[in-house]
Amino acid sequence: MNRFRMITALALIYMVFAILLNSVGTVILQSIYTFGVDKPQASLLELFKDLPIAITSFLVASFLPLLGYRRAMILALTIVACACVLMPLYPGFRTAELLFTCVGVSFALAKVAVYSSIGLLTSDRSEHGRLTNTIEGLFMVGVLIAGWLFSAFVDRDAPANPSWLNVYWVLAVACVLVIVLLATSRMDESAAHADEAKPVRGSLLEMLHLFLRPLVYVFLASAFLYVLIEQSFSTWLPTFNNEILKLPNAMSIQLATILAATSAIGRIVAGQVLRRMPWYALLNICVVGMGLLVTLTLPLAHGITAQADVGWFDAPIAAYLIPLIGLLMAPIYPVINSVALSSLPKPSHAAMTGLIVIFSALGGTLGSRITAIVFSRFDGIHAFYFSLVPMLLILVTLFLFKRETDRHGNGEASIKLIAK
């Protein structure tokens, strides 16, 4: 088994999908200019991305071991490479919808295969945790690359110029290179075939059975609200920078990458803070801090006028302060996921993971849609103010979630173990 080559391939796959998944905000902004669509219509790209992820994640879990994890990753990259080639050849919003549908389906295949492969490439829990954190960390690197890569192809003087679509040739080539790496690598998947794959009906029944647990539906409500908030900012920040802060398209996209950087830092710092602070206290501080940051920062975005040749040193201060919300958002999702999974018996983890993916996808789609409607009917400032509503609701669900995990008694112990 070519362990190093396979680990390299897993990391590169995640980076490629990070670029594609997190380009949706950029593509929404450019679609408004290039294809002449309005904001509510442009927000449908989030739907075309998230729903295929949810549906495919549920379906593939039952037969992916039979297909093979390495083959599944090659199939996912092949689908995406073909979709990337179509974008510059047949430019249009319908092609963009097709692209994100393919990205959603392929990411579901890749994510299940990558996470399952980590278990085959590691020998103990500690090694598994290190490799998982490394790959997730490189995912955030891909998020950072996305903004700079796409902005490099945006015509600063003519934002509507479809030349930005040439970025997809680069992404198609990247997919092909990773396919070659996977095709020339080997991985022992015999352990994955130890048990027969569950039928789809059995997987569905197991997921439905989990809804009988109060801890599960309270957790899913928390995860849903978090993703609703997170996608509202990450998807619409480039458009906010452009229309409200009056920044050029390319610079709007580049400044939005600060959100990804602060999110990465937030997750790293949270791992250290959790050594000394209970998870419930930390998350409440994060949510309240998010609300304060939104309330204090958005007034700075009022009344900004466009400037000629605006640069990084004379951009509005709000362009740098709003992305700091990533520091506070970042710890919430991984912490509640870990607490929820550690509070359930291990045989239920696969079904629970499927529910997490489904509700995360629904939250992301709804968050982007609501933001688009408010953005279109009012403005971006009101759209971001609306995030205060799910922030208030998540404080309620976190309280209920804490009460349920206390009944199980092992959520806090698991978080302390993870922090170490």
Image: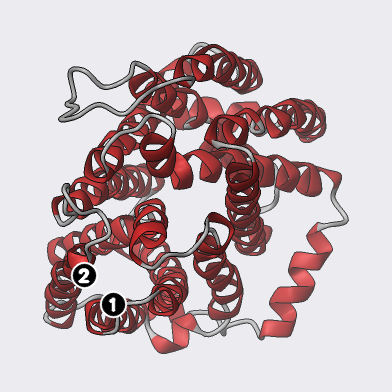
User: Which is more toward the observer, 356 or 184?
Assistant: 356
Say which element carries label 1: helix
Q: Which residue is mark 1?
A: 87
Quick check: marks 1 and 2 in contact, CB under 8 Å?
Answer: yes
Q: Using the rendered image of the protein, determine whether residue 420 is visible from the camera's viewpoint.
A: no
Q: Position of residue 235 (x, y in %)?
A: 46, 47
Q: Position of residue 111 (x, y in %)?
A: 42, 65
User: Residue at horizontal 14%, vertical 61%?
Assistant: 4
User: Residue at horizontal 18%, vertical 78%?
Assistant: 179
Please identify the quarter of the rendering in which residue 44 is found.
Answer: bottom right
Q: Is residue 220 left or right of residue 182?
A: right
User: Which is more toward the observer, 228 or 217?
Assistant: 228
What amino acid is labelled 1 in the image? Met
User: Which is more toward the observer, 203 or 290?
Assistant: 290
Q: How is the image coloured?
A: secondary structure
Q: Is residue 309 above or below residue 361?
A: above
User: Residue at horizontal 45%, vertical 26%?
Assistant: 419
Q: Is residue 321 left or right of residue 58?
A: left
User: Residue at horizontal 69%, vertical 75%?
Assistant: 203
| Residue 168's disc number | 2
Q: Is residue 359 above or below residue 269?
A: below
Give the position of the N terminus as an image quadrant: bottom left
| Residue 314's disc number | none
What amino acid is labelled 2 in the image? Tyr
Q: Earlier in the sequence, mark 1 or mark 2?
A: 1
Q: Residues within 10 Å of mark 1 (few under 14, many from 20)?
A: many
Q: Position of residue 19 (x, y in %)?
A: 29, 56
